[in-house]
Image (tube, coloured by chain):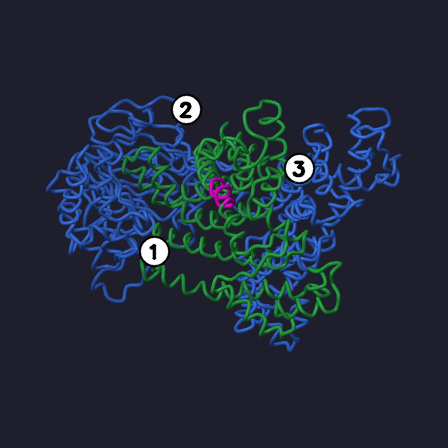
Chain colours: A green, B blue
Amino acid sequence: MGRYILKRLLSAIPVLLGITVIVFLIMAMIPGDPATAILGSYATPENVAKLNRDLGLDKPLVQRYFIWLGNMLTGDFGRSFSLNRPALDEIVERFSATLVLAGTSFVLCSLLGILAGVVSAARQYGLADKAITFVVLIGISVPSFFLGMMMILLFAVNLRWLPVSGMYAIYGGGDLPDLLRHLAMPALALAAVATGVIARLSRSAMLEVLRQDYIRTARAKGVPERRVLMGHALRAAMVSIIPVLGIQAGFVLSGAVYIELVFQWPGVGRMLVDAILKRDIILVQGGVVFVAACYVLFNIAVDVAQSLLDPRIKT
Amino acid sequence: MSAFLRLLFRNRLAALGAVVLGAILLLVLAIPLLPLPDPDVIATADRFQPPFSEGHLLGTDHLGRDLLSRLLYGTRLSLAVGVVAALIAASIGSAIGIIAGYFGGRIDNIIMRGVDMLMAFPYILLALAIVAALGPGLLNALIAVAAVNIPFFARNIRGITAGLAQREFIDAARLAGLGHTRIILQELFPNVLPVIVIAMSTTVGWMILETAGLSFLGLGSQPPQADLGSMLGEARAALISAPHTSFVPGVMIFLIVMSVNLLGDGIRDALDPRLKSGALSRPLPMTQVRRRGDVPPATDDLLAIQHLETQFHVGKRIYRAVNRVSLAVKPGECLGVIGESGSGKSVTALSVMGLVSSPPGVITGGAVRLEGEDLLGAKYETLRAKRGEKVAYIFQDPLATLHPLYKVGHQLAEAIQVHHKPSDREARARALDLLKSVRMPNAESRLDNYPHEMSGGMRQRVGIAMALANDPEVIIADEPTTALDVTVQAQILALLDDLRRERGLAIVFITHDFGVVAQLCDSVAVMYAGRIVEQGPTDTVLNAPAHPYTKRLIACVPELGGGQRELAAIPGLPPVVDNLPEGCAFAPRCDKARDECRRGDIPLDGQAPRAVRCLFPEEPVT
C-alpha cells in the first residue's frame, strides 16, 4: 500500500507541472502590459520599466516560467499588491476557510447522496423513490447561489434561526457552536447540486449491482435484505460511486466561489474574484495553482480509497 | 426518428421539459412583437415597484427598470450565450476528440495528456484564470465557459471515435484510398454526430448556468447589459428589502436549467436500449407470487414442487418459463433435471426459494413444499430463515456468483452467521472446516483469498462449501460443473456424491449433460419448453428413453471408447415460450411428429415413477 501511494504521488508530479504551465500560459495571454495595469495612473515609463524589472517581466517567457516555478517551490508565491502582503499567506488563510465550508459540504453531499440513492434503488418506482427523484431533480436544477439567497430570506430574515452571513459573529463569536450556526446554510446550499448528482448515480449503481449474480447468492444464503442492500450491494456499488465523489469534490470546490460571495464567507473563491476585479494577477495565479494542486492531491486520496475498497485493483 | 420522438414524449417528465423550454423560447423569440418597455430606461422614482403594479407586471428593479422586460432580454442573452458556448465547446472538443481517436498512437497520447491536465482543475479555477487574463466581460466569460468544457467533449468523442476507427467500414475506406480528411468527414463524422448531440443536450443547461454564474460574480456581462446571472447579482444587494428582484431572474434560471435537464435525460433514456426493455429493474428480495387456482395438498416428500407455474411478464408478453412442473425428492435422494438452455430447468430451481428475478418473474400457480410447508405462500422472513439453512444452492460460474470484494472466509462465515450466532472466531474455524471438507488445498491460507485470486475449480469448491455451511436438508445444484474442465468436474461430482451418502442430503441437480446425470442421480426429469416431457429412474430413462427428445438428447453425449460415432445434434432450436403452439412443443423438431401431435394438450402419462408426454413414445412406459 505504501508503495502504491508513493507511485501515485510520483505520477502526480507531471500533472502538477502541467497545471503550472497551463496557468502560466493563460496569464501570459494578458493583453497589454501588466505593469501598466498594476500601476494605473502612476504608469510613467520609468515606473513601468522599474516594475517590469522587479517582476522579472523583461526576461524571455521560458526563463520567467522557471523563475516563477522555482520561487513557488521554495514557498515564495510573490506579493499581492492589492493586499500588500505575501500571496501565499493570504491564500493559505483564505483556503482554510474554504476547506471548512467545502469539506463540510462534501461530507454532507456524500452521505445524503448515497443514502438517498440506496433508498431510491431499494424502493424502485415506490413512493420514496419518486419523492427522492423529484427532490433530486429540483436540487440539480436550482443554481446554488439562488438557493443560498432564498435560504437567507427564509432562515435568516423570516425565521431568524441562523445568521445572515459571515463565518463568525463579530462580537462574542469564534467558538464551534458559532461556526456551526454560520456554516449550516452555506454548507447545505453548496451541497445541494452534488447531493443530487451523487444520489442519481448511487441509485443507478445500486440497481446495476442488485441484478448481479452474487446478490442472488447472498439472498440464497439467507442474508437479510437490509444487509444485502447496505452490505453486499452498497459495497460493490461504491466501486463506481467513489470516482464520482472525487469529481463532485471538484464541483463543490467550484461552487464554493458563488456560495462564499452570497454568504460573505472569507474563503479563497471570494479572494480570487476580488483579485480578478482588482487585476491582482500574482494573487490569482498563485491561488489557482495552490487550489488546483490541493485538488490533485485529494484525487490521489480518492484513488487510494478506491484501491482499499477493491482488491482487484493492482497496488 | 418518429419512434424516438414517441419514446421521448412517452416520458412525461421529458415532455414537461420540452413544453417549459418551448414556452420560454417562444416568449424570447416574440420579444420584438411584445409591447415591452426599454429594459435599460432608468426611472429612479419608480424603483422597487412590487409585482403586478401599474405598467410593470413583475415590478421594477433598483433603478426603476421594468423587470419583465429585463427578464426577457436577459433570458435571451443567457440562452444565446449558453448555446453558443456549448456549440464552441462541442465543435472544438469533438474535433480534438476525433483527431485523437482516429489517429491514435502518439498523437492520441499527447492530446489526451493535455486533456487530462485540463481536467485536473476544478472547472471554475480554469474559468476564473481565463477571465482573469482576458478581463471581465460577457464575451470573455463565454470563452472561459466554452474552454472549460472542451476536455469533456474531447474525452467522450475520442472514446467513441477510437472504437469506430477499428471497424471494418473505416478499413474499407482506407483500402479504397480515401484520404484522412475524407474518411473523417464522410465516414466517421456522421457516426459520431449523434453522440455529440447527446453530449450537448446534457451539457447545454450546465453551460447556461456557468455563464450565469460568472455574470453573478460580476465577471460576465457588464452594466447596462444584463443576463440572468448579472440581474441576480445586482439584485443581491436588495435581497432583504426587495426579494422579488432576486426571485424573478433566479426562478427563470431554475426553469431553464430544469427543463433542459429533463429534456436531456429524456433524450438519453430514449436512446438507451436497456431502459426500453425495462432491464434496469431491481429484483425484489423474493419472487412475486400471484397464484390462481387451488394450492395442491401436502405430500410426505422432503421437497415437493407441485404444478409449479413461473412466468416472466415483459411488457405485454408472457413467457411461460415453467408450466405446471411437479418434482419431488426424499432424504438422500438425488434427482436430475435435464434440458437445453431455455427449457425452464434453472427457473424451476430458483422458484423453490423465491430467487427468480422479480420483476419480471411471477409465480402464478402451484406450490413448493418443504416438509409439507408451502413456501410460496410464506412471508419473506419465514422464507429467508430457510434459505441456506434448510435449502441451499450451488450456482454455476462462481466468479460471478461469489462477491468480488469480500474474502472467501468472510463469505463462508457470513453464511453461518446469518442463521446462527457463533463468535467470529468460531465462524472462521467452521469456515476452515468447510473448506477442508470440500478438499480445498491449503485451506487455511485460502480463507483470506478473494474469489479472483482462485482458480475456477477452487471457487466452485467454495460455492459447495458455502452451500454446506448450515448442514441443509436439500441442495439445489444449478449446473455447478458446467464451467469446469473434465477432471475437476469429476472430482466435484464425486465430492457431492460422498456428501449425499455421508449426510443424507437430498440433491436436485440441474444440468444439460446426461453423462453427469448417469454418474450421480437416482432419477431424472427431462424438461422441454417449460414442461416435463419424461421422467423415471435414471437407468430406465437412459437405457429405454421413451420421448423422442430424450432419445436425441442422450445421443448427443459422446461415449468413451465409442469410436467414430457421430454426434447427433438436434436440428432446430428450442421454442421461445411466449407463444407456444398447441400440442407437443417438440413437434416442429421431431421427425416422428404426426398431425395429432399438433393438437390439444398432451398429458404426462405413465405409471409412477415412469412418465412420458408423448402420443407415440419410443418405448411403452406402462
Q: Is residue B133 left or right of residue A173?
A: right
Q: Residue A29, image x and y in percent?
A: 67, 65
> Is disc 2 placed on a helix, strand or loop?
loop
Task: Specify start and end residues of the magenta stretch as a single range.
Answer: A97-106
10 Å crowding of disc 1: few (<14), some (14-19), many (20+): some
Q: Is residue B330 left or right of residue A203?
A: left
Name the chain under label 2: B
| Relative to B495, residue A31 above or below | below
10 Å crowding of disc 2: few (<14), some (14-19), many (20+): few
Q: What residue is at 40 percent from the left and 61 percent from the top? A: A8
Name the chain under label 1: A
The residue at which mark 3 appears reads as: B254
The residue at which mark 2 appears reads as: B292
Q: Name the amino acid, label 3.
A: Phe
Instruction: Name the quadrant of the C terminus of chain B.
Output: top left
Q: Residue B546, image x and y in percent?
A: 28, 44
Kindly indicate whether the residues beneath marks 2 and 1 are on one polypeptide chain: no
> Is disc 3 placed on a helix, strand or loop?
helix
Q: Residue A181, image x and y in percent?
A: 50, 31
Q: What residue is at 58 percent from the left and 53 percent from the top? A: B123
The residue at which mark 1 appears reads as: A312
Q: Look at discs 2 and 1 and give the one toward the viewer.
A: 1
Residue B1 visible, this orientation: no
Q: Name the amino acid, label 1.
A: Arg
10 Å crowding of disc 3: few (<14), some (14-19), many (20+): many
